[in-house]
Image (spheres, rainbow, N blue to C red):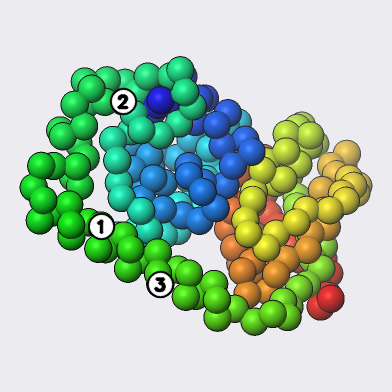
Amino acid sequence: MGFGDLKTPAGLQVLNDYLADKSYIEGYVPSQADVAVFEAVSGPPPADLCHALRWYNHIKSYEKEKASLPGVKKSLGKYGPTGVEDTTGSGAADAKDDDDIDLFGSDDEEESEEAKRLREERLAQYESKKAKKPAVVAKSSILLDVKPWDDETDMTKLEECVRSIQADGLVWGSSKLVPVGYGIKKLQIQCVVEDDKVGTDMLEEQITAFEDYVQSMDVAAFNKI
């Protein structure tokens, strides 16, 4: 398993393809798996790798709380698609010797027990939060106007980037291109969000992160459901 060399375009392409139908490296919430891969990437992926860039910007927003994310950080060779060997930095060698990189995989029984205890505490906290959520979920229907830079912007690619944004409580709906003048068209796209999980600030931050395609984003309509 692995992504190849995440500091090269080829490795980032593997990561982008892997995230095409996933929000996170493992599971359905941010975890130490995302932290391990995030730290191996040297910077934001290019805009044409929209799945990888969407994931990178999302995990970056957890920078101050990444130590508290659930799970145990493993070597990079433990993540990603099968049949691809990790070669990031010295990753190829490290994948053969997990003791060199897996801070929780040493032979020290005391350290392993501490890692296990922390993992169980964090999972218990997460399950407790889920159990306390109200049965009635407040939702809103939002209509967004996403404007390109000019009439030469690839609007198909722009919409693909927008729809690549995935989050728990976010469902994309219909869309259309609306002329704004001088041959320029904006993307008008509908989405339904769960209010306690997804906000317009988060949507704006992630959509405008595709700066090669997106000039700005505005909320055209916002209605409670």
Location of residue 70 by image quarter: bottom left
The answer to whether the residue labelled 2 contacts the one labelled 1, judged by CB atoms less than 8 Å apart, is no
Q: What amino acid type should be assigned to the residue bearing mark 3?
A: Gln
Q: Do labels 3 and 1 touch, CB within 8 Å?
A: no
Task: Kindly identify which numbered label has been placed on residue 12.
Answer: none
Residue 192: image location, x then y, percent: 78, 63
**Does 191 sit left or right of 180 as displayed?**
left
Where is mark 1, residue-wise? 116
1 vs 177: above or below: above
Mark toward the viewer: 3 or 1: 1
Which is nearer the eye, 58 or 185? 58
Give the percent coordinates (x, y) of residue 2.
40, 26
Comes first in the chain, label 3 or label 1 = 1
Identify the element where label 3 is drawn. helix
Amino acid type, callout 2: Thr
Crowding at label 1, few (<14), some or many (≥20) Cα neighbours within 10 Å?
Answer: some
The residue at 23%/22% (across/down) is 96
Residue bearing mark 3: 125
Q: Is residue 79 left or right of residue 108?
A: right
SS for callout 2: loop
What mark, if any, has residue 88 been given in the picture?
A: 2
**In this rendering, the label closer to the viewer, 2 or 1:** 1
Distance between mark 2 and mark 1 Cα atoms? 27 Å
Which of 40/74 is in front?
Answer: 74
Left or right of residue 26: residue 42 = left
